[in-house]
Image: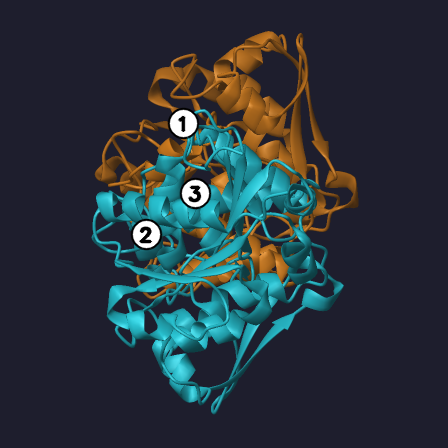
Chain colours: A orange, B cyan
Amino acid sequence: MMAILDENSREQVLALCGGIGGAKLALGLYRTLAPGRLTVAVNTGDDFSHLGLHVSPDIDTVAYTLAGLNDTERGWGLAGETWHFMEALGRLGGETWFQLGDHDLATHVLRTRRLAAGETLSQVTSAMAGRLGLHARLLPMSDDPVRTLVDTEEGRLAFQNYFVEHHCRPRVTGITFAGAEAAKVQEDVLALLGDGALAAIVICPSNPYLSVDPLLAIPGLREALKASPAPVVAVSPIVGGRAVKGPTAKIMEELGLPVSSRAIAEHYGDLLDGFILDDADAADATGLGVPAVATRTLMETLDDRERLARSVLNFASGLRRHP
Amino acid sequence: MMAILDENSREQVLALCGGIGGAKLALGLYRTLAPGRLTVAVNTGDDFSHLGLHVSPDIDTVAYTLAGLNDTERGWGLAGETWHFMEALGRLGGETWFQLGDHDLATHVLRTRRLAAGETLSQVTSAMAGRLGLHARLLPMSDDPVRTLVDTEEGRLAFQNYFVEHHCRPRVTGITFAGAEAAKVQEDVLALLGDGALAAIVICPSNPYLSVDPLLAIPGLREALKASPAPVVAVSPIVGGRAVKGPTAKIMEELGLPVSSRAIAEHYGDLLDGFILDDADAADATGLGVPAVATRTLMETLDDRERLARSVLNFASGLRRHP
């Protein structure tokens, strides 16, 4: 069995991914693996209908990031974006709390139109990836609607209202994935998990509670991940007891959890075959009951992303269950 | 009875209007009449669903024109418009034959959303006029869908496909207003026609066949116009045997009609109480069977628009049936 990083390998890698943070590692994997080897299954719990348009924030973030079109300064959306639509919308009295750039809007208008014409979100997403020239498969976690709802001390909020409108300010008391129980795992994802060509499953350093749990809430996915012969490796989003970006640490505190990589590994539990955490949290690597390795997980540069991707894939190679 | 142009008059004026050409006179009337005196009933036969959005080109043209937001150089759309959405749409493989500017798009997105939520086109249009600060009432000819279909030697084309996609090139053999027979005249328009405060009805110099006939095709409107005590005055879109802009002359030729103001007056027939045509066509004013006056009808400047509006209103004042 050759190592996953062997340049002649044609084995497949599956990444599970949310938005910004996870997309950084997805980009590292994308640039490290030969064309056709990477599949990214993306959280759609953040999807919502806004102004009559179907917005899939995480799919778009991953697609734009892999295509090199994302704005790295602002941290979200497209580079060179303009905001004339929003200005005009504001003058007409429309809702402006969720920013839709002029270029980005084309994605939402086309997606909405194709979904209304009967295409699945998988088909729309694949077509988008094709138009952007991506050599990875980009798939929603499900073609069925799953909606992340955040229970807070100020009541239940739809994800985008919590995240964007309220800036993650309300204290979180619980998280619900409405529709998950009736949803089916995207069929190509399920097929890949049963495919002998799958060499590694990578849980990207997205927010476990908001961005990865929606995938794991879909009946059968957790079981299929465990049953897959490919090792499951998660990368911790915690660095030195803090979240690199976003509300992960704040939510962990509000849910009464220690803000640590150990708590992240325990959250994923027996799903994991391996765990990668930051050098700053190396002490958390012992006694986890699962192989763990500490490395630099902060992804500031493109080199950081590629180096972490190689570390993850090398680590996964060593975890494979040899016959 | 005071003249319509008397500055103390509070009498109402109703303008029937299509897009670009008609909107010029509507602007003249708007600037000439005191706030609250003008109602514009606009053709919606050109409305269509594009990319899942409800586009009402003539309503938008009139609204933007009255608000002073229209692009007078390009001749359509908003001044200072940008086209980033269209560029992104093209990259994603979307349809680009119909140009939607970034600012303009806000109008369509909001309208589509409000219609989907159950508002009528009248409500959406009134709200838009309010947001733009207009002191005229802007109303669609009907809240029911009427669609102008152009029969050509290359088959039947929806209006925008004929007008924009095919640049009015195919030879016209006939024009159909689908849905008109089942449509109801917008109720405020109908109420105004029976209101003693209505002092004049102005048919703007829009294309009679494509932009005014859709209104007249709605059952009851023609009868209500004739029954109204207010005089009906049409302004010819023909100047010196040619159309100022657009396909009016081409369509008249293709339908076997002489390209003349006389043919326009005959087209409206007994609907008219008065007719205004250009000085260049003054010879057509005689023997029409209806009072006619020749003046400069070309509207190049804002002064032209206001001067023609005053001519129309003065002429209408003289046509009123005194008790």
Secondary structure type for disc 1: loop
Separation (CA) of disc 3 from disc 1:
24 Å
Look at the numbered discs 3 and 2 and tell me whether their residues touch, using CB distance below 8 Å: no
Residue on which disc 3 sits: B63
Give B71 or A107, whichever is nearer the viewer: B71
Kind of residue at badge 3: Ala
Circle 3 SS class: helix
- Residue at the spot of label 2: A67
**Disc 2 is attached to a residue of which chain?**
A
Q: Residue at x 52, y 16 (%)?
A: A166
Q: Between residue B33 and residue B318, name the one nearer to us.
A: B318
Left or right: A146, with B150 as reference point: right
Three-letter amino acid code at disc 2?
Ala
Please state, as top left, top right, bottom left or bottom right, where the C terminus of chain A lies in the image: bottom right
Say whether residue B285 is visible. yes
Report the Cα–Cα distance between label 3 and label 2.
40 Å
Please tell me which residue lies in front, B49 or A262.
Answer: B49
Q: State the image coordinates of residue A119 (x, y, percent, origin top left).
A: 61, 63
Task: Please give left or right for residue A108 compared with residue A177 in the image.
Answer: left
Label 1 sits on what residue type? Glu
- What percent of the width, then of the height, locates residue A148? 64, 31
Which one is closest to the eye, mark 3 or mark 1?
1
